[in-house]
Amino acid sequence: MSTTTSTNPARTTHPVEVSATELRTWLAGDAAPRVLDVRTPGEYAAGHVPGSYNIPLSTLTEHARSVADHLDQDVVLVCRSGARASAAAQALAQTGGTGMHVLTGGIQGWSGTGGEVRETAGPWELERQVRLVAGGIVLGSVLASTVVPGAKWVAAGIGGGLTFAALSNTCAMGQALMRMPWNRGGQRQLRDALSGLAGRCQG
């Protein structure tokens, strides 16, 4: 249920959806929330809400209690489209965290309605990594098939996997890449985000 009657949604024990328009108004007010981006570092670097902090979903899930303990005010969780942000909100809710909100439509909805998006240096976004890995495997297996004919079936397997990913709107390769160290975020990144969430003004 989207909050439309107040620019400062009530602090609740369950996640509340907030539209991009509502978030912009809320951020411009005196009681602005923290914005926590739960995408991979590469996705975050490619474009994020200015002033937001990045803790990838896998890292947040592992340290949900610590993250919840550092939330001193309302937090809006952001991902690409909203699914990972909702999962993060549920993980925090299970620790007793309050004041959690999910940005409806994610960063896509934010940028699509004119919200400012800031880029920083970092790893490639996840979709680009998937294209690199899948393309590399297909190319390598096709070249290898000139020596080992059976290698062509590796390329066929990747093609079948990508087709299934499109039909089911899932991506096993993407899920696997999300668990790689460069996409999970290190302990230093986690500490910096927690410090900012608890004690710093948004930049």
Image (cartoon, rainbow, N blue to C red):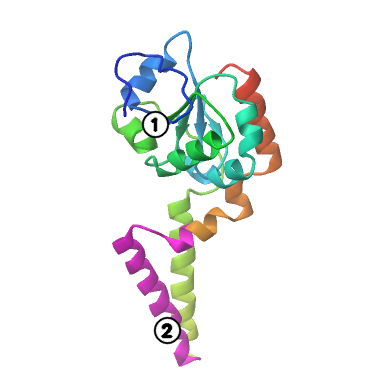
Q: Is residue 153 left or right of 121 when viewed as pictured?
A: left
Extreme-top residue of the structure: 30
Q: From the viewer's perspective, tell me whether residue 33 is left or right of residue 163.
A: right
Residue placed at 57% from the left, 47% from the top?
Answer: 58
Stretch in magenta: 148-174
Task: Tell me the element at label 2.
Answer: helix
Residue receiving disc 1 = 103
Foreground pick, 59 / 52 = 59
Rendering coords of residue 130 (x, y %): 46, 59
* 17 left or right of 99 in image: left
Q: Going by the image, does 138 lie left or right of 169?
A: right
Q: In this orientation, does residue 140 appear?
A: yes
Identity, as a three-letter code, of the amino acid under mark 1 = Leu
The quarter of the picture where the C terminus appears is top right
Mark closer to the observer (2, 1): 1
Q: Earlier in the sequence, mark 2 or mark 1?
A: 1
What number of labels is visible?
2
Does any portion of residue 120 appear in the rendered image? no
Amino acid residing under circle 2: Trp
For image coordinates 63% across by 24% down, the residue present is: 196
Mark 1 neighbour density, 10 Å: few (under 14) some (14–19) many (20 or more): many
Please give the residue where the numbered disc 2 appears in the rendered image.
153
Q: Measured from the top left, where is residue 106 in percent x and y?
A: 38, 36
Q: Where 93 falls versus 28 (above or below)?
A: below
Mark 1 residue element: strand
Along the viewing direction, whichever of 129 and 144 lies nearer the viewer: 129
